[in-house]
Amino acid sequence: MSSEFQANMVALNTIVYREVRRFTRIWPQTLLPPAITMVLYFVIFGNLIGRQIGDMGGFSYMEYIVPGLIMMSVITNSYGNVVSSFFGAKFQRSIEELMVSPLSPHTILTGYVIGGMLRGLMVGVIVTALSLFFTHLQVHHLGITVLVVILTATIFSMLGFINAVFARNFDDISIVPTFVLTPLTYLGGVFYSISLLPPFWQTVSLANPVLHMVNAFRYGILGVSDISIGVAVAFMVVATVVLYVACVKLLVSGRGMRS
């Protein structure tokens, strides 16, 4: 085992530990709010509105929306952790120390992405545990469920990284979540099946990447989906590879990270 490899492994462990310590230390701001928000969704949409809607896809409305709400919490927290952490490092100029170090850009990127994934998955587990107080869940296909949630957390962690690289101020890190991520999530089949839409809007909805992630995860939990699972998983794998290459190139170029 070379000394360079050992140094990169130590650095990776350090970055991951720092990222995890960062969001667990302030858990009332990072873990508690999404849990409270999801409980409100369960009560308002699942119990109150769900009683008026009835069944959807062969399941109660509460059962139908739970996978989407879990995925929504994973998406927003994976993205939010990396974009805020990496931009904070840029703002404090501490990222420049990593850039001039002999560390591999793969090590730096992997450390931040794992940190975002862990926060997203941790919140997802919390939301899943809370959902059991409102409905019964059983996993239809464990392999697809785990694969989809990991790929989704990875994709949005890297998207958060890209947003942080190009952000020039704190306002810039809120533009994408507010005007892009939130609309895509709410229109991604979290609260409804696209089969309820007219044919034209069903076709338009297929261009929403979040729709594929939510439906693939819903298939893993409930066994129902509005889209092809093979297409959804293939899309996520390709997106992961493309985003990883793009993030590494940004690190190598130093764009937006060197003054």
Image (tube, rainbow, N blue to C red):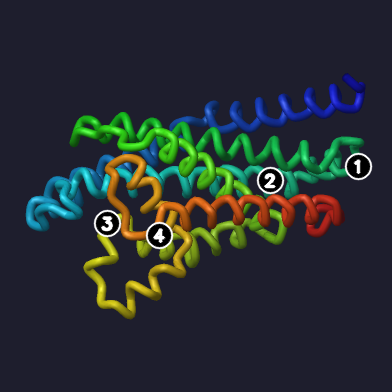
In the rendered structure, which amino acid carries the disc numbered 3?
Phe
- Disc 1 is placed on an element classified as helix
Answer with mark 4 or mark 1, whichever residue precedes in sequence: 1
Answer with mark 1 or mark 3, whichever residue precedes in sequence: 1
The CA span between labels 1 and 3 is 46 Å
In the rendered structure, which amino acid carries the disc numbered 4?
Leu
For residue 186, side relative to residue 57 (left or right): right
Q: Where in the figure is residue 37, as x and y percent of width and height? A: 32, 44
Pointer 2: what residue?
86
- Disc 4 is placed on an element classified as helix
Pointer 4: what residue?
211
The CA span between labels 1 and 2 is 16 Å
Residue 200 versus residue 3: which sits nearer the camera? 200
> Which label number is shown at residue 191?
3
Answer with mark 4 or mark 2, whichever residue precedes in sequence: 2
| Crowd around label 1: few <14 · some 14–19 · many ≥20 (10 Å) | few
Q: Residue at x 60, y 56 (%)?
A: 239
Q: Where in the figure is residue 252, as x and y percent of width and height? A: 85, 51
For residue 162, side relative to residue 206 (left or right): right
Which part of the image, by quadrant, shows the N terminus?
top right
Kindly report which numbered mark, 4 or 2, lies closer to the viewer in this rendering. Answer: 4
Q: Residue at x 82, y 29 (%)?
A: 8
| Crowd around label 2: few <14 · some 14–19 · many ≥20 (10 Å) | many
For residue 75, side relative to residue 255 (left or right): left
Pointer 1: what residue?
100
In the rendered structure, which amino acid carries the disc numbered 2?
Phe
Q: How many numbered badges does the structure rendering display?
A: 4
For residue 55, side relative to residue 165 (left or right): left
Answer with mark 1 or mark 2, whichever residue precedes in sequence: 2
